[in-house]
Amino acid sequence: MEILIEITAEKDFFQTENLTREAFWNVYRPGCAEHLILHNLRKTKSYISELDLVAVSGGKIIGHIISTKARVVGEAGIEHEVLCVGPLSVLPELQKKGIGAKLMKSSIAIARRLGYSGMILFGNPDYYHRFGFRNAKEFGITTKDGQNFEPFMAIELNANALVHVQGRFFEDDAFEFDPETLTAFEKLFPYKEKLVTDTQFK
C-alpha cells in the first residue's frame, strides 16, 4: 500500500474529524470527544497548519495527526513553547499496518524542521516509545496538576533541546469541552451507538 503524507486541506477538515470519530468511538469512553477536540483546535492560536497531516492511499484519506502549540511553565513563571501531539487517528479497518507510525514520524520530522524543542503527549507507552518518547518525568516536566505517569511522555527534537524546559505542561484549552457542546456537535455526524467496552476499565 503506497501511503502519502500531506498537509490537510481545509476542504477535508470535516472528513478528518469523522475519521477521528471512527477511530476513537467507544475506545476510552462511550462514544468519544476526540473529533470535537480536533475541530476546536483548528480554531485556536495554537493551530499549526504544517502539523495538521493526513495519510492518503489511492486518493483516500486513511489517517490523520495534529500537533499544536503548548507550553511548559517553570517555577519562576518562565514559559517554554513545546508541541502537544494528538489526536492521532487511523481508520479502524486499517490499523496496525504502519499508517500511524508513518504519520508520527512525518510529524516529528516537520516539527524538528520548524525549530520546536520537543513534543509531549498522553498515550500508550508501548506504542510511542518506538519513536523516542520517554516518561516526561525524565525531563523534569509534569502535568499541569504536577503529576507524572507512564502515558505522559515527551521527546526532544534535538539533542538536549529540553534540558532547560522544566515545569508544568499546559495544552490548549480546546482539550476541555462541555457535554452540551459535544452533544450538539454529534448531530453533524451519522448516528453511532455508544457502548461501554472492557477497554474503558483497563
Image (cartoon, rainbow, N blue to C red):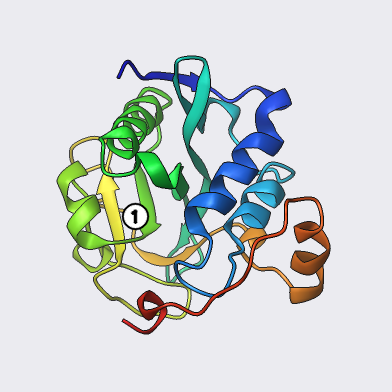
Q: Residue at x 74, y 75 (%)?
A: 179
Left or right relative to 36: residue 70: left
Q: Residue at x 20, y 42 (%)?
A: 131
Q: Which residue is mark 1?
A: 165
Quarter residue 7 falls in: top right
Q: Counting other residues with Cα less than 10 Å from the Cα at mark 1, is it few (<14), some (14-19), or many (20 or more)?
A: many
Q: Is residue 159 positioned above or below 124 on the image?
A: above
Q: Is residue 21 positioned above or below 145 on the image?
A: above
Name the one closer to the observer, 169 or 91. Answer: 91
Quarter residue 19 falls in: top right
Q: Secondary structure at mark 1?
A: loop
- Tell me residue 98's x, y (percent): 26, 35
Q: Residue at x 37, y 32 (%)?
A: 103
Name the one closer to the observer, 39 or 99. Answer: 99
Name the one closer to the observer, 19 or 179. Answer: 19
Left or right relative to 133: residue 56: right
Q: Residue at x 24, y 70 (%)?
A: 150
Q: What count of labels does the image hold?
A: 1
Q: Is residue 201 visible?
A: yes
Residue located farthest toward the bottom when viewing the structure as drawn: 201
Q: Is residue 79 visible?
A: no
Q: Is residue 151 positioned above or below 126 on the image?
A: below
Amino acid type assigned to the residue bearing label 1 in the image? Val
Q: Quadrant of the N terminus?
A: top left
Quarter residue 90 falls in: top left
Q: Quadrant of the C terminus?
A: bottom left
- Tell me residue 74's x, y (percent): 42, 66
- Tell me residue 57's x, y (percent): 43, 19
Q: Is residue 37 positioned above or below 177 on the image?
A: above
Name the one closer to the observer, 123 or 201. Answer: 201
- Tell me residue 142's x, y (percent): 36, 71
